[in-house]
């Protein structure tokens, strides 16, 4: 997989169907609460929406899907819930990777792995290795991910690799950010009704179209996804240019 250019340096290609969709899967706890179930039942149910979304992306030929599963701030939750989320993640890795592999999906995991125990880190490496040679959908799961961590981590790696640099350019940093293998997201979806980024992909969302829906993640089905895609199709992606420039293609 080659490198993609930056939306702030070059106007990226735009298609009817987004190439890369990034999702904050929010509202699991509220979904459970509405049903008088423990919050964790919502997370369990949320996994079904993940499966459906992966299938939908394969069907619609969306090439990259990035899902926010656990933020660097989610450690602040009650210990019980954190432990449950970790075991759900481990279980999902065990159970789903084979299916993903059979579906030709490339699995990538982004975030600070140093917080996870050795067994989990090993599973993460194995899951990525198993699917690395596939050629289908690139599914990225963000775990213990934070947008600020991503930028600072990239800076640290760059400083280590190039101590000679006195000043850096955007393009120096790009290979060290979390997703150099993917174009910047075309469409961002947040379920659950909050209209914030919550420290998700801060750098990469520079020109992404944002879509917020009150639908809770466990209820986010194919129709809900189609509504997001339909909203996306109506957007005019100007990347700083005027509307007129887009119509006459004079930017070309
Ligand atoms: C999102 O659902 C899942 C994670 C953050 C792991 P929440 O657990 O945040 O659900 P709400 O927002 O409390 O409803
Ligand atoms: C964002 O949801 C993180 C994930 C979905 C993994 P949160 O529920 O943690 O976000 P806040 O706390 O409402 O901003
Ligand atoms: Mg939430």
Image (tube, rainbow, N blue to C red):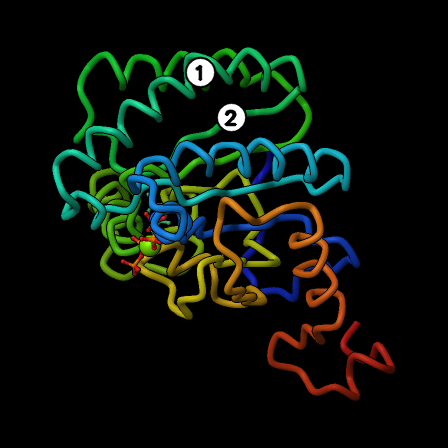
Q: Position of residue 245 (x, y in %)?
A: 78, 84
- Which residue is the site of mark 1? 127
Q: Residue at x 75, y 72 (%)?
A: 234
Would you say 92 lies left or right of 225 here? left
Q: Label 1: few (<14), some or many (≥20) within 10 Å?
A: many
Q: Label 2: few (<14), some or many (≥20) within 10 Å?
A: many
Residues at marks 2 and 1 touching, judged by CB atoms closer than 8 Å: yes
Q: Residue at x 29, y 13 (%)?
A: 122
71 vs 13: above or below? above
| Camera-side residue of 232 and 48 | 48
Q: Position of residue 229 (x, y in %)?
A: 70, 58
Q: Residue at x 60, y 58 (%)?
A: 187
- Which residue is the site of mark 2? 107
* Snapshot quadrant of residue 207: bottom right
243 vs 130: above or below? below
Q: Position of residue 157 (x, y in %)?
A: 25, 41
| Camera-side residue of 7 and 118 | 118
Circle 2 SS class = strand
Q: Mark 2 and mark 1: span between their CA atoms? A: 7 Å
Indicate which quadrant contains ligand 2: bottom left
């Amino acid at each position: 997989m080659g490198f993609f250019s930056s939306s702030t340096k070059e106007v990226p290609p735009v298609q009817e169907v987004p190439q890369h969709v990034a999702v904050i899967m929010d509202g699991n706890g509220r979904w459970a609460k509405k049903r008088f179930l423990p919050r964790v039942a919502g997370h369990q149910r949320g996994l079904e929406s993940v499966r459906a979304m992966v299938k939908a992306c394969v069907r619609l030929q969306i090439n990259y899907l990035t899902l926010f599963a656990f933020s660097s701030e989610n450690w602040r939750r009650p210990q019980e819930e954190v432990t449950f989320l970790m075991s759900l993640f481990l279980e999902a890795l065990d159970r789903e990777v084979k299916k993903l592999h059979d579906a030709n999906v490339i699995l990538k995991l982004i975030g600070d792995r140093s917080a996870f125990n050795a067994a989990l880190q090993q599973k993460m490496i194995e899951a990525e290795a198993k699917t690395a040679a596939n050629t289908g959908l690139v599914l990225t799961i963000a775990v213990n991910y934070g947008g600020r961590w991503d930028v600072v981590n990239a800076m640290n790696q760059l400083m280590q690799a190039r101590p000679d640099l006195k000043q850096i350019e955007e393009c120096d940093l790009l290979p060290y950010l979390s997703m150099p293998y993917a174009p910047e997201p075309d469409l961002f979806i947040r379920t659950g009704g909050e209209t914030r980024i919550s420290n998700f992909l801060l750098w990469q969302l520079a020109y992404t179209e944002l879509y917020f829906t009150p639908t809770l993640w466990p209820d986010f089905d194919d129709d809900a996804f189609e509504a997001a895609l339909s909203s996306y199709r109506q957007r005019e992606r100007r990347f700083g240019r005027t509307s007129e420039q887009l119509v006459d293609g004079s930017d070309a």
